[in-house]
Image (cartoon, helix red, strand yellow):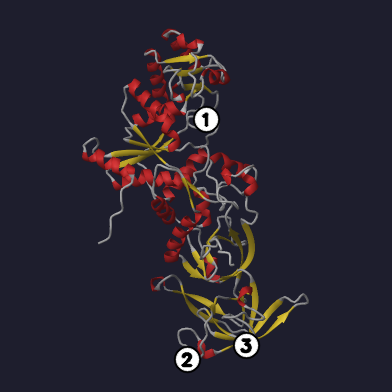
Amino acid sequence: MSEEKSLNFLEEIIETDLADGKYTSIVTRFPPEPNGYLHMGHATSICLNFGLTNKYPGYTNLRFDDTNPVAEDTEFVESIKEDIKWLGFEWKHELYASDYFDTMYEYAVTLINKGLAYVEDATAEEIAKLKGTPTEPGKDSAARSRSVAENLDLFTRMKNGEFADGTKTLRAKIDMAHTNMLMRDPLIYRIKHAHHHRTGDKWCIYPMYDFAHGQSDSIENITHSICTLEFIPHRELYDWFIEKLEIYPSHQYEFARRNLSYTVMSKRKLKQLVEEKHVAGWDDPRMPTISGMRRRGFTPQSIRTFCDKVGIAKRENIIDFSLLEFCLREDLNNTALRTMAVLDPLKLIITNYEDGKTEELQSENGPDEAYGTRTVPFSKELWIEREDFMEVPAKKWFRFAPGASVRLKSAYILRCDTFDKDESGKVTAIHCTYFPESKSGSDTSGIAVKGTIHWVSATHAAMAQVNMYDRLFKVENPGSEEGDFKDYINPDSLHIVQAFIEPSLLKATLSDHFQFLRKGYFCLDKESTAEKIIFNRTVTLKDAWVKEVKKG
Protein backbone atom coordinates (compact mmCIF):
# COMPACT_ATOMS: atom_id res chain seq x y z
CA MET A 1 0.00 0.00 0.00
CA SER A 2 1.53 3.30 -1.10
CA GLU A 3 1.91 6.13 1.39
CA GLU A 4 -0.32 9.14 0.95
CA LYS A 5 1.46 12.40 0.28
CA SER A 6 1.58 14.53 3.42
CA LEU A 7 -0.39 17.76 3.49
CA ASN A 8 1.37 21.11 3.19
CA PHE A 9 0.64 23.74 5.82
CA LEU A 10 -2.03 25.47 3.68
CA GLU A 11 -3.85 22.20 3.06
CA GLU A 12 -3.78 21.52 6.82
CA ILE A 13 -5.35 24.97 7.46
CA ILE A 14 -8.02 24.44 4.80
CA GLU A 15 -8.92 20.96 6.03
CA THR A 16 -9.27 22.29 9.57
CA ASP A 17 -11.42 25.22 8.35
CA LEU A 18 -13.71 22.86 6.42
CA ALA A 19 -13.89 20.32 9.26
CA ASP A 20 -14.74 23.05 11.79
CA GLY A 21 -17.49 24.40 9.54
CA LYS A 22 -15.79 27.78 9.13
CA TYR A 23 -16.36 27.39 5.39
CA THR A 24 -18.29 24.90 3.28
CA SER A 25 -16.12 25.77 0.28
CA ILE A 26 -13.04 27.88 -0.32
CA VAL A 27 -12.29 30.76 -2.68
CA THR A 28 -8.76 31.67 -3.77
CA ARG A 29 -7.49 34.15 -6.32
CA PHE A 30 -4.48 34.70 -8.57
CA PRO A 31 -3.91 38.49 -8.64
CA PRO A 32 -1.18 39.47 -11.16
CA GLU A 33 -0.36 43.05 -12.05
CA PRO A 34 -0.60 43.36 -15.86
CA ASN A 35 2.77 45.10 -16.22
CA GLY A 36 4.81 42.25 -17.69
CA TYR A 37 4.82 38.59 -18.59
CA LEU A 38 4.38 35.80 -16.05
CA HIS A 39 7.46 33.80 -15.02
CA MET A 40 8.13 30.54 -13.19
CA GLY A 41 7.59 32.20 -9.81
CA HIS A 42 4.05 32.99 -10.93
CA ALA A 43 3.65 29.41 -12.15
CA THR A 44 4.18 28.23 -8.56
CA SER A 45 1.45 30.57 -7.34
CA ILE A 46 -0.90 29.59 -10.16
CA CYS A 47 -0.47 25.86 -9.47
CA LEU A 48 -0.95 26.50 -5.74
CA ASN A 49 -4.11 28.62 -5.92
CA PHE A 50 -5.83 26.65 -8.65
CA GLY A 51 -4.54 23.36 -7.26
CA LEU A 52 -6.18 23.99 -3.89
CA THR A 53 -9.61 24.60 -5.42
CA ASN A 54 -9.17 21.55 -7.65
CA LYS A 55 -8.55 19.49 -4.51
CA TYR A 56 -11.15 21.09 -2.22
CA PRO A 57 -14.68 22.43 -2.88
CA GLY A 58 -14.53 25.97 -4.22
CA TYR A 59 -13.12 28.03 -7.06
CA THR A 60 -10.33 30.44 -8.03
CA ASN A 61 -10.71 33.94 -9.45
CA LEU A 62 -8.32 35.62 -11.85
CA ARG A 63 -8.07 39.22 -10.69
CA PHE A 64 -5.83 41.74 -12.38
CA ASP A 65 -4.27 44.23 -9.96
CA ASP A 66 -4.56 47.13 -12.38
CA THR A 67 -4.15 50.09 -10.00
CA ASN A 68 -1.10 51.60 -11.72
CA PRO A 69 -2.18 52.83 -15.18
CA VAL A 70 1.32 53.95 -16.20
CA ALA A 71 2.80 50.44 -16.21
CA GLU A 72 -0.13 48.36 -17.43
CA ASP A 73 -1.18 47.20 -20.87
CA THR A 74 -3.82 44.96 -22.44
CA GLU A 75 -0.95 43.03 -24.11
CA PHE A 76 0.08 41.78 -20.69
CA VAL A 77 -3.53 40.98 -19.75
CA GLU A 78 -3.92 38.72 -22.78
CA SER A 79 -0.53 37.03 -22.27
CA ILE A 80 -1.39 36.26 -18.63
CA LYS A 81 -4.71 34.67 -19.60
CA GLU A 82 -3.00 32.61 -22.30
CA ASP A 83 -0.35 31.37 -19.87
CA ILE A 84 -2.87 30.25 -17.23
CA LYS A 85 -4.96 28.39 -19.80
CA TRP A 86 -1.84 26.78 -21.27
CA LEU A 87 -0.89 25.50 -17.82
CA GLY A 88 -4.26 23.76 -17.76
CA PHE A 89 -6.30 25.91 -15.36
CA GLU A 90 -9.62 27.74 -15.65
CA TRP A 91 -10.74 30.61 -13.43
CA LYS A 92 -14.31 31.08 -12.22
CA HIS A 93 -14.45 34.89 -12.63
CA GLU A 94 -12.20 37.22 -14.60
CA LEU A 95 -12.02 40.36 -12.47
CA TYR A 96 -10.05 43.59 -12.21
CA ALA A 97 -9.20 45.78 -9.23
CA SER A 98 -10.49 48.60 -11.43
CA ASP A 99 -13.94 46.96 -11.25
CA TYR A 100 -14.00 48.15 -7.65
CA PHE A 101 -12.71 51.73 -8.01
CA ASP A 102 -16.12 53.19 -7.11
CA THR A 103 -16.43 50.92 -4.08
CA MET A 104 -12.86 51.61 -2.96
CA TYR A 105 -13.50 55.32 -3.19
CA GLU A 106 -16.53 54.89 -0.93
CA TYR A 107 -14.40 52.82 1.45
CA ALA A 108 -11.90 55.68 1.62
CA VAL A 109 -14.72 58.13 2.34
CA THR A 110 -15.91 55.80 5.12
CA LEU A 111 -12.45 55.90 6.73
CA ILE A 112 -12.41 59.71 6.51
CA ASN A 113 -15.84 59.91 8.12
CA LYS A 114 -14.62 57.65 10.94
CA GLY A 115 -11.65 59.94 11.50
CA LEU A 116 -9.32 57.18 10.26
CA ALA A 117 -7.94 58.88 7.13
CA TYR A 118 -6.70 62.32 6.15
CA VAL A 119 -5.44 64.21 3.13
CA GLU A 120 -1.68 64.83 3.21
CA ASP A 121 0.12 67.77 1.56
CA ALA A 122 3.68 66.60 2.24
CA THR A 123 5.89 65.23 -0.50
CA ALA A 124 7.04 61.60 -0.56
CA GLU A 125 10.44 62.69 0.76
CA GLU A 126 8.88 64.66 3.62
CA ILE A 127 6.59 61.77 4.52
CA ALA A 128 9.58 59.42 4.61
CA LYS A 129 11.45 61.72 7.02
CA LEU A 130 8.46 61.86 9.37
CA LYS A 131 8.13 58.05 9.40
CA GLY A 132 10.97 57.59 11.89
CA THR A 133 13.06 54.41 12.08
CA PRO A 134 12.44 50.87 13.37
CA THR A 135 13.82 52.03 16.75
CA GLU A 136 12.47 55.59 16.79
CA PRO A 137 8.80 56.61 16.51
CA GLY A 138 7.60 58.77 13.67
CA LYS A 139 6.23 62.28 13.94
CA ASP A 140 2.71 63.45 13.20
CA SER A 141 2.22 65.40 10.01
CA ALA A 142 0.61 68.83 10.32
CA ALA A 143 -2.20 67.52 8.10
CA ARG A 144 -3.06 64.76 10.61
CA SER A 145 -5.23 67.15 12.64
CA ARG A 146 -7.46 68.19 9.74
CA SER A 147 -11.19 67.95 10.36
CA VAL A 148 -13.39 65.32 8.74
CA ALA A 149 -15.15 68.02 6.70
CA GLU A 150 -11.88 69.43 5.36
CA ASN A 151 -10.58 65.97 4.47
CA LEU A 152 -13.82 65.10 2.65
CA ASP A 153 -13.62 68.33 0.67
CA LEU A 154 -9.97 67.86 -0.27
CA PHE A 155 -10.45 64.21 -1.20
CA THR A 156 -13.40 65.11 -3.43
CA ARG A 157 -11.27 67.75 -5.12
CA MET A 158 -8.47 65.22 -5.57
CA LYS A 159 -10.95 62.96 -7.37
CA ASN A 160 -12.17 65.88 -9.48
CA GLY A 161 -8.66 66.53 -10.79
CA GLU A 162 -7.97 69.88 -9.09
CA PHE A 163 -4.48 68.93 -7.92
CA ALA A 164 -1.31 67.93 -9.75
CA ASP A 165 0.41 64.55 -9.39
CA GLY A 166 2.33 64.23 -6.14
CA THR A 167 0.82 67.29 -4.47
CA LYS A 168 -1.62 65.40 -2.24
CA THR A 169 -2.20 61.87 -0.99
CA LEU A 170 -4.73 60.20 1.28
CA ARG A 171 -3.26 58.48 4.35
CA ALA A 172 -4.74 56.14 6.92
CA LYS A 173 -4.60 57.51 10.47
CA ILE A 174 -3.23 54.66 12.56
CA ASP A 175 -0.19 55.14 14.82
CA MET A 176 3.03 57.03 14.02
CA ALA A 177 4.76 55.20 16.89
CA HIS A 178 3.72 51.70 15.77
CA THR A 179 6.45 49.02 15.85
CA ASN A 180 5.42 47.95 12.33
CA MET A 181 6.62 50.76 10.06
CA LEU A 182 3.86 49.94 7.55
CA MET A 183 1.28 50.93 10.17
CA ARG A 184 2.64 54.47 10.48
CA ASP A 185 -0.13 56.23 8.58
CA PRO A 186 0.31 54.44 5.22
CA LEU A 187 -0.79 55.94 1.91
CA ILE A 188 -4.22 54.89 0.67
CA TYR A 189 -4.60 56.98 -2.51
CA ARG A 190 -2.28 58.94 -4.77
CA ILE A 191 -2.94 61.34 -7.65
CA LYS A 192 -1.93 60.06 -11.09
CA HIS A 193 -3.26 61.80 -14.17
CA ALA A 194 -2.86 58.89 -16.58
CA HIS A 195 -5.08 57.02 -19.03
CA HIS A 196 -6.16 53.64 -17.63
CA HIS A 197 -6.39 50.67 -19.99
CA ARG A 198 -9.94 49.90 -18.79
CA THR A 199 -11.44 52.97 -17.07
CA GLY A 200 -9.97 55.49 -19.50
CA ASP A 201 -9.81 59.00 -18.01
CA LYS A 202 -12.57 58.54 -15.44
CA TRP A 203 -10.13 58.53 -12.53
CA CYS A 204 -7.07 60.59 -11.69
CA ILE A 205 -6.68 59.11 -8.21
CA TYR A 206 -5.75 55.47 -7.74
CA PRO A 207 -5.69 53.25 -4.63
CA MET A 208 -2.36 51.96 -3.32
CA TYR A 209 -1.74 48.22 -3.46
CA ASP A 210 -2.11 47.71 0.31
CA PHE A 211 -5.54 49.32 0.20
CA ALA A 212 -6.80 47.75 -3.02
CA HIS A 213 -5.54 44.24 -2.29
CA GLY A 214 -7.42 43.37 0.88
CA GLN A 215 -10.57 45.20 -0.12
CA SER A 216 -10.69 43.37 -3.46
CA ASP A 217 -10.27 40.07 -1.59
CA SER A 218 -13.11 41.02 0.72
CA ILE A 219 -15.46 42.09 -2.08
CA GLU A 220 -14.89 38.69 -3.75
CA ASN A 221 -15.30 36.75 -0.46
CA ILE A 222 -11.83 35.26 -0.79
CA THR A 223 -11.42 32.79 2.07
CA HIS A 224 -7.68 32.15 1.73
CA SER A 225 -5.64 35.03 0.31
CA ILE A 226 -2.26 33.48 -0.46
CA CYS A 227 0.82 35.71 -0.81
CA THR A 228 4.60 35.33 -0.65
CA LEU A 229 6.63 35.88 2.50
CA GLU A 230 7.48 39.53 1.87
CA PHE A 231 3.83 40.35 2.60
CA ILE A 232 3.99 39.14 6.22
CA PRO A 233 4.50 42.73 7.54
CA HIS A 234 1.55 43.84 5.37
CA ARG A 235 -0.88 41.38 6.98
CA GLU A 236 -1.46 43.62 9.99
CA LEU A 237 -2.50 46.48 7.71
CA TYR A 238 -4.58 44.08 5.59
CA ASP A 239 -6.52 43.10 8.72
CA TRP A 240 -6.79 46.70 9.98
CA PHE A 241 -8.56 47.92 6.85
CA ILE A 242 -11.01 45.00 6.91
CA GLU A 243 -11.74 45.52 10.61
CA LYS A 244 -12.28 49.29 10.38
CA LEU A 245 -14.42 49.02 7.25
CA GLU A 246 -16.41 46.15 8.79
CA ILE A 247 -16.36 44.11 5.59
CA TYR A 248 -15.98 40.39 4.76
CA PRO A 249 -13.00 39.06 6.78
CA SER A 250 -10.68 37.57 4.16
CA HIS A 251 -7.49 36.23 5.70
CA GLN A 252 -3.94 36.39 4.31
CA TYR A 253 -1.52 33.45 4.38
CA GLU A 254 2.11 33.53 3.24
CA PHE A 255 4.39 30.97 1.61
CA ALA A 256 8.01 31.11 0.48
CA ARG A 257 9.11 32.04 -3.02
CA ARG A 258 10.83 29.34 -5.03
CA ASN A 259 13.70 30.82 -7.04
CA LEU A 260 15.32 28.89 -9.90
CA SER A 261 19.07 28.53 -10.22
CA TYR A 262 20.91 30.06 -13.21
CA THR A 263 18.22 32.66 -13.82
CA VAL A 264 16.56 35.73 -12.33
CA MET A 265 12.89 35.98 -11.39
CA SER A 266 12.60 39.70 -10.77
CA LYS A 267 10.20 41.32 -13.23
CA ARG A 268 12.36 44.44 -13.14
CA LYS A 269 15.48 42.49 -14.10
CA LEU A 270 13.67 40.50 -16.75
CA LYS A 271 12.45 43.79 -18.22
CA GLN A 272 16.07 45.00 -18.34
CA LEU A 273 17.11 41.90 -20.27
CA VAL A 274 14.36 42.58 -22.81
CA GLU A 275 14.80 46.33 -23.15
CA GLU A 276 18.60 46.16 -23.37
CA LYS A 277 18.38 43.43 -26.06
CA HIS A 278 20.22 40.74 -24.11
CA VAL A 279 17.37 38.46 -25.20
CA ALA A 280 15.00 38.56 -28.16
CA GLY A 281 11.89 39.42 -26.15
CA TRP A 282 9.73 38.32 -23.22
CA ASP A 283 9.21 34.95 -24.88
CA ASP A 284 12.85 34.34 -25.73
CA PRO A 285 13.34 30.59 -25.05
CA ARG A 286 16.12 31.38 -22.56
CA MET A 287 13.80 33.47 -20.39
CA PRO A 288 12.10 31.99 -17.29
CA THR A 289 8.79 33.46 -18.45
CA ILE A 290 5.98 30.98 -19.02
CA SER A 291 5.73 32.17 -22.64
CA GLY A 292 9.49 31.67 -23.05
CA MET A 293 9.29 28.17 -21.59
CA ARG A 294 6.38 27.34 -23.88
CA ARG A 295 8.30 28.56 -26.93
CA ARG A 296 11.31 26.49 -25.90
CA GLY A 297 9.15 23.37 -25.74
CA PHE A 298 8.42 22.92 -22.06
CA THR A 299 5.13 21.14 -21.47
CA PRO A 300 2.36 22.22 -19.06
CA GLN A 301 2.58 18.82 -17.38
CA SER A 302 6.31 19.18 -16.71
CA ILE A 303 5.81 22.57 -15.02
CA ARG A 304 2.88 21.32 -12.95
CA THR A 305 4.91 18.27 -11.90
CA PHE A 306 7.85 20.51 -10.97
CA CYS A 307 5.63 22.78 -8.84
CA ASP A 308 4.18 19.71 -7.13
CA LYS A 309 7.62 18.22 -6.39
CA VAL A 310 8.95 21.52 -5.05
CA GLY A 311 5.87 22.00 -2.89
CA ILE A 312 5.42 25.02 -0.64
CA ALA A 313 7.17 25.99 2.56
CA LYS A 314 7.75 28.96 4.86
CA ARG A 315 11.45 29.40 4.06
CA GLU A 316 12.84 30.65 0.76
CA ASN A 317 15.48 28.72 -1.14
CA ILE A 318 16.84 28.22 -4.63
CA ILE A 319 15.63 25.20 -6.58
CA ASP A 320 18.09 23.65 -9.00
CA PHE A 321 17.07 24.18 -12.62
CA SER A 322 18.04 20.53 -13.16
CA LEU A 323 14.91 19.44 -11.26
CA LEU A 324 12.72 21.31 -13.75
CA GLU A 325 14.63 19.70 -16.62
CA PHE A 326 14.23 16.29 -14.98
CA CYS A 327 10.45 16.75 -14.86
CA LEU A 328 10.53 17.82 -18.50
CA ARG A 329 12.59 14.81 -19.62
CA GLU A 330 10.24 12.46 -17.77
CA ASP A 331 7.26 13.89 -19.64
CA LEU A 332 8.89 14.13 -23.06
CA ASN A 333 10.40 10.66 -22.82
CA ASN A 334 6.85 9.30 -22.65
CA THR A 335 5.24 11.61 -25.19
CA ALA A 336 7.72 13.04 -27.72
CA LEU A 337 7.73 11.75 -31.28
CA ARG A 338 10.98 10.08 -32.36
CA THR A 339 12.72 11.34 -35.46
CA MET A 340 16.19 11.84 -36.92
CA ALA A 341 18.21 14.99 -37.56
CA VAL A 342 21.93 15.50 -38.11
CA LEU A 343 23.28 18.63 -36.46
CA ASP A 344 26.97 18.40 -37.46
CA PRO A 345 26.87 16.60 -40.80
CA LEU A 346 29.45 14.31 -42.37
CA LYS A 347 28.73 12.72 -45.76
CA LEU A 348 28.47 8.91 -45.90
CA ILE A 349 28.57 7.22 -49.31
CA ILE A 350 27.49 3.57 -49.71
CA THR A 351 29.74 2.30 -52.49
CA ASN A 352 27.78 -0.88 -53.27
CA TYR A 353 24.31 0.74 -53.18
CA GLU A 354 22.60 1.31 -56.53
CA ASP A 355 22.78 4.87 -57.89
CA GLY A 356 19.40 6.63 -57.88
CA LYS A 357 17.75 3.95 -55.77
CA THR A 358 15.49 4.93 -52.85
CA GLU A 359 14.02 2.63 -50.22
CA GLU A 360 11.12 3.47 -47.93
CA LEU A 361 12.06 2.13 -44.52
CA GLN A 362 9.87 2.01 -41.42
CA SER A 363 11.06 3.55 -38.14
CA GLU A 364 9.37 3.73 -34.72
CA ASN A 365 7.38 6.92 -34.32
CA GLY A 366 7.35 7.15 -30.54
CA PRO A 367 8.32 5.60 -27.22
CA ASP A 368 6.12 2.52 -27.70
CA GLU A 369 4.22 0.55 -30.34
CA ALA A 370 1.05 2.61 -29.84
CA TYR A 371 2.69 5.45 -31.78
CA GLY A 372 3.14 3.28 -34.87
CA THR A 373 5.84 3.83 -37.47
CA ARG A 374 6.74 6.41 -40.06
CA THR A 375 8.36 6.12 -43.50
CA VAL A 376 12.01 7.19 -43.74
CA PRO A 377 13.71 7.38 -47.17
CA PHE A 378 17.08 5.64 -47.59
CA SER A 379 19.54 6.23 -50.44
CA LYS A 380 23.15 5.86 -51.54
CA GLU A 381 24.34 9.08 -49.87
CA LEU A 382 23.53 9.86 -46.25
CA TRP A 383 24.37 12.39 -43.57
CA ILE A 384 25.67 11.20 -40.22
CA GLU A 385 27.00 13.10 -37.20
CA ARG A 386 30.66 14.01 -37.50
CA GLU A 387 31.19 12.74 -33.96
CA ASP A 388 30.16 9.24 -35.11
CA PHE A 389 33.40 8.76 -37.08
CA MET A 390 36.89 8.51 -35.65
CA GLU A 391 39.92 8.19 -37.90
CA VAL A 392 41.94 6.54 -35.14
CA PRO A 393 39.36 4.88 -32.88
CA ALA A 394 39.64 5.12 -29.13
CA LYS A 395 39.35 2.11 -26.85
CA LYS A 396 35.77 0.72 -26.74
CA TRP A 397 34.78 2.84 -29.75
CA PHE A 398 31.64 1.28 -31.26
CA ARG A 399 30.90 3.71 -34.06
CA PHE A 400 32.47 4.27 -37.48
CA ALA A 401 36.19 3.95 -37.97
CA PRO A 402 38.20 2.35 -40.81
CA GLY A 403 37.20 -1.33 -40.88
CA ALA A 404 34.50 -0.93 -38.19
CA SER A 405 30.86 -1.91 -38.70
CA VAL A 406 27.84 -0.03 -37.33
CA ARG A 407 24.07 -0.40 -37.64
CA LEU A 408 22.11 2.53 -39.01
CA LYS A 409 18.89 3.02 -37.04
CA SER A 410 15.96 1.17 -38.73
CA ALA A 411 18.19 0.41 -41.74
CA TYR A 412 21.29 -1.70 -42.45
CA ILE A 413 24.68 -2.63 -41.06
CA LEU A 414 27.52 -0.78 -42.82
CA ARG A 415 31.27 -1.25 -42.75
CA CYS A 416 33.50 1.79 -43.11
CA ASP A 417 36.16 1.18 -45.75
CA THR A 418 37.84 4.49 -46.58
CA PHE A 419 37.48 8.22 -46.00
CA ASP A 420 38.33 11.49 -47.76
CA LYS A 421 40.05 14.58 -46.37
CA ASP A 422 40.40 18.13 -47.62
CA GLU A 423 43.63 20.14 -47.73
CA SER A 424 43.29 21.15 -44.10
CA GLY A 425 43.07 17.53 -42.99
CA LYS A 426 39.37 17.64 -42.21
CA VAL A 427 37.43 14.48 -43.04
CA THR A 428 34.87 15.32 -45.75
CA ALA A 429 33.27 11.93 -46.44
CA ILE A 430 33.44 8.28 -45.50
CA HIS A 431 32.90 5.38 -47.91
CA CYS A 432 31.09 2.30 -46.66
CA THR A 433 29.84 -1.11 -47.76
CA TYR A 434 26.33 -2.14 -46.76
CA PHE A 435 25.07 -5.69 -46.16
CA PRO A 436 21.67 -6.11 -47.87
CA GLU A 437 20.70 -9.08 -45.68
CA SER A 438 21.16 -6.98 -42.48
CA LYS A 439 17.97 -4.91 -42.87
CA SER A 440 16.34 -4.04 -39.56
CA GLY A 441 13.43 -6.33 -38.77
CA SER A 442 14.59 -9.07 -41.15
CA ASP A 443 18.33 -9.37 -40.43
CA THR A 444 19.79 -12.69 -41.60
CA SER A 445 23.39 -11.48 -41.92
CA GLY A 446 24.70 -13.00 -38.71
CA ILE A 447 26.88 -9.90 -38.26
CA ALA A 448 27.11 -8.66 -34.67
CA VAL A 449 27.67 -4.96 -34.03
CA LYS A 450 27.59 -2.96 -30.80
CA GLY A 451 26.87 0.51 -32.18
CA THR A 452 23.68 2.00 -33.66
CA ILE A 453 23.61 5.56 -35.00
CA HIS A 454 21.07 7.88 -36.59
CA TRP A 455 21.24 9.33 -40.11
CA VAL A 456 19.24 11.09 -42.81
CA SER A 457 19.19 10.56 -46.54
CA ALA A 458 21.22 13.28 -48.26
CA THR A 459 18.93 13.11 -51.28
CA HIS A 460 15.76 13.66 -49.28
CA ALA A 461 16.90 15.71 -46.27
CA ALA A 462 15.63 19.22 -45.63
CA MET A 463 17.79 21.99 -44.19
CA ALA A 464 16.78 23.56 -40.88
CA GLN A 465 18.14 26.12 -38.47
CA VAL A 466 18.45 24.64 -35.00
CA ASN A 467 18.75 26.93 -31.99
CA MET A 468 20.78 25.17 -29.30
CA TYR A 469 19.71 26.91 -26.09
CA ASP A 470 21.51 26.68 -22.78
CA ARG A 471 21.20 28.41 -19.41
CA LEU A 472 21.05 32.18 -19.57
CA PHE A 473 23.50 32.76 -16.71
CA LYS A 474 26.87 31.24 -15.82
CA VAL A 475 26.35 31.33 -12.06
CA GLU A 476 23.74 29.71 -9.85
CA ASN A 477 22.33 32.87 -8.28
CA PRO A 478 23.17 35.85 -10.53
CA GLY A 479 20.95 38.20 -8.55
CA SER A 480 23.08 37.78 -5.42
CA GLU A 481 26.51 38.20 -7.03
CA GLU A 482 28.54 41.40 -6.77
CA GLY A 483 28.14 44.00 -9.50
CA ASP A 484 25.59 44.03 -12.29
CA PHE A 485 23.66 40.76 -12.65
CA LYS A 486 23.97 41.10 -16.43
CA ASP A 487 27.74 40.62 -16.12
CA TYR A 488 27.01 36.95 -15.48
CA ILE A 489 25.07 36.30 -18.70
CA ASN A 490 26.27 33.08 -20.36
CA PRO A 491 27.80 34.06 -23.75
CA ASP A 492 27.10 30.51 -24.98
CA SER A 493 23.41 30.46 -24.07
CA LEU A 494 22.52 30.30 -27.78
CA HIS A 495 24.41 28.40 -30.45
CA ILE A 496 22.84 28.24 -33.94
CA VAL A 497 23.57 25.33 -36.28
CA GLN A 498 22.40 24.39 -39.73
CA ALA A 499 21.15 20.83 -39.66
CA PHE A 500 19.73 18.21 -41.99
CA ILE A 501 16.35 16.82 -40.96
CA GLU A 502 14.34 13.86 -42.21
CA PRO A 503 11.39 14.87 -44.46
CA SER A 504 8.71 13.89 -41.92
CA LEU A 505 9.71 16.96 -39.89
CA LEU A 506 8.41 19.21 -42.68
CA LYS A 507 4.93 18.42 -41.30
CA ALA A 508 5.82 19.53 -37.75
CA THR A 509 3.41 21.86 -35.94
CA LEU A 510 3.96 24.20 -33.00
CA SER A 511 2.24 21.75 -30.64
CA ASP A 512 4.55 18.84 -31.52
CA HIS A 513 7.45 17.68 -29.37
CA PHE A 514 10.27 15.63 -30.87
CA GLN A 515 13.18 13.58 -29.69
CA PHE A 516 15.91 13.95 -32.28
CA LEU A 517 17.43 10.53 -31.69
CA ARG A 518 20.58 10.72 -29.57
CA LYS A 519 20.59 14.55 -29.67
CA GLY A 520 17.87 15.77 -27.32
CA TYR A 521 14.31 17.08 -27.36
CA PHE A 522 13.27 19.77 -29.83
CA CYS A 523 10.24 21.73 -31.00
CA LEU A 524 9.32 23.97 -33.91
CA ASP A 525 9.86 27.68 -33.28
CA LYS A 526 7.01 30.13 -33.82
CA GLU A 527 9.09 32.05 -36.40
CA SER A 528 9.60 28.95 -38.54
CA THR A 529 8.31 29.19 -42.12
CA ALA A 530 8.19 26.91 -45.14
CA GLU A 531 11.17 28.83 -46.53
CA LYS A 532 13.14 28.83 -43.26
CA ILE A 533 12.50 25.94 -40.90
CA ILE A 534 13.56 26.63 -37.29
CA PHE A 535 13.72 24.21 -34.38
CA ASN A 536 14.58 24.96 -30.76
CA ARG A 537 16.38 22.57 -28.48
CA THR A 538 14.12 22.13 -25.47
CA VAL A 539 16.48 20.06 -23.33
CA THR A 540 19.34 17.62 -23.70
CA LEU A 541 18.80 13.87 -23.25
CA LYS A 542 20.89 13.93 -20.09
CA ASP A 543 21.79 16.63 -17.58
CA ALA A 544 24.80 18.34 -19.14
CA TRP A 545 25.34 20.48 -16.03
CA VAL A 546 26.14 17.65 -13.62
CA LYS A 547 29.29 18.69 -11.76
CA GLU A 548 32.30 16.67 -12.79
CA VAL A 549 34.27 15.00 -10.05
CA LYS A 550 37.90 15.95 -10.44
CA LYS A 551 40.25 13.00 -10.53
CA GLY A 552 43.34 12.81 -8.39
Q: Which residue is mark 3?
A: 403
Relative to residue 204, is residue 279 depicted above or below? Answer: below
Q: Secondary structure at mark 1?
A: loop
**Left or right side of 363 for 467:** right
Is any atom of residue 204 visible in this view? no
Relative to residue 491, is residue 109 depicted above or below? Answer: above
Q: Which residue is mark 2?
A: 444
Q: Of the residues shown, which amino acid type is indicated by label 3?
A: Gly
Q: Of the residues shown, which amino acid type is indicated by label 2?
A: Thr
How packed mark 1 is, by other alpha carbons closer than 10 Å (few <14, some 14-19, many 20 or more), is: many
Determine the image quadrant of residue 373.
Answer: bottom left
Residue 209 picture location, percent across and down: 46, 29
Residue 36 picture location, percent across and down: 53, 40
- Where does the C terminus fall, quadrant-wise? bottom right
User: Which residue lies most toward the right here?
Assistant: 423
Q: Which residue is mark 1?
A: 69
Determine the image quadrant of residue 500.
Answer: bottom right
Is any atom of residue 513 visible in this view? yes
